[in-house]
Image (spheres, rainbow, N blue to C red):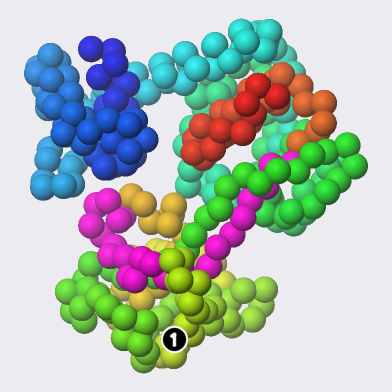
Amino acid sequence: MIDDIFLFIILYEAHSFTKVAETSNIQQSTVSKRIYKLEAALGHALIIRNGTNFKVTEFGDYIYNKFRHIPLFISTTLESYKNGFYSDSNDTITVSLPFILSYELLSPHIEKFMIFYPNVKLNILYEKDVPDFGVVDFAITRHNINHLGFTTKFFRREYAHLYCSNQYAQKYGVPLSTHDLNDRKFINLILDGEKHILPLKNGKTSQEFIPHFCNNLHIDNVMHSKQMGIHATEHLFGCWDFMCAKELAAGVVVPILPDWSIHTLDFYLIQKFNARNIDKIFINFISEHLGCHLMNGR
């Protein structure tokens, strides 16, 4: 049963049977059967199925909140033992993290780390500029820079695509070609104080296309752009894929021309050459929740 509970935790966080099957390397039908088996053993429904989508029940929320810390507890405990480091450490970690990426993918899980390492003092600085490497122990940053005493490696690439709300799709239909984007209203982002129309780029062919949007709304914050976009009935919007994952799974937003991205952004891990064990453990924790595995025992 415990393995099936772990599987449910993964499903709860992924919001997708397909993603769970891919990441767990098992058939989607097997995932579904194991969740049914778990529900039968527990005597209550964990999810309410609606075609390929589902909604978590109140009991499902209860089970998730009661057991969600266990898989990470196991992995961090083993990692701590491997590195000769235990939870009674009273070290201080100071780290610089990217604001939006952390807000969506990491901040909801930080308490887990603090539960396992209650004596660690954790200072998180959310990046506004180049991290201060005189202060931080390591950084996840969009700046690919070399700093004396630190090593830099590629961490993660994020993609932004075009989306529209479900209401927009019902009203106007979903654009089916790049030229179908012309004259559509679009929530345009102001980047570095300037209005930009970024070219769309086809990930398969590398072809580029600049649509002639009807731009009458310009803002300088992607989080507000998303909030406007998911409620908009007249405008398309662009958004980082990780920010729209939940809304996409729930059918709130509709992807537009998924082969064409509007922007990419690379992130880098910059850490000291002689990283401490506690730094390695926290980096592994971050990597797990951002879908990366970087340390490889280093």
Q: Name the residue rendered at 61%, 8% in the picture.
A: 81
Could you tell me which residue is drawn at 47 percent across and 47 percent down? 104
Amino acid type, label 1: Pro
Instruction: Give me the residue at 51% from left, 32% from top.
Output: 288
Look at the image and tell me in which quarter the N terminus lies.
Answer: top left
Nearest the eye: 69 or 111: 69
Considering only vertical position in the picture, is 129 above or below 7? below
The picture quadrant where one finds residue 285 is top right
Horizontal side of 267 relative to 43 (left or right) equals right
Q: Disc 1 marks which residue?
A: 211
Residue at the extreme front of the image, as rendered: 205
Give the vertical position of 25 relative to 190 (above or below): above
Would you say residue 262 sits in the magenta stretch? Answer: yes
Residue 146 in sight in this render: yes
Q: Circle 1 — which element?
A: loop
What predominant SS class does the magenta segment belong to?
strand
Q: Which residues are magenta?
A: 247-270
Quarter-wise, where is residue 3 in the image? top left
Q: Quick check: 113 above or below 207?
A: above
Camera-nearest residue between 20 and 133: 20
User: Few, some or many C-alpha atoms within 10 Å of disc 1 (few <14, some 14-19, many ≥20)?
Assistant: some
Q: Residue at x 27, y 27 (%)?
A: 8
Q: Quadrant of the C terminus?
A: top right
Q: Nearer the viewer, residue 111 or 212?
A: 212
Placement of 136 over or under 73, stated as above or below: below
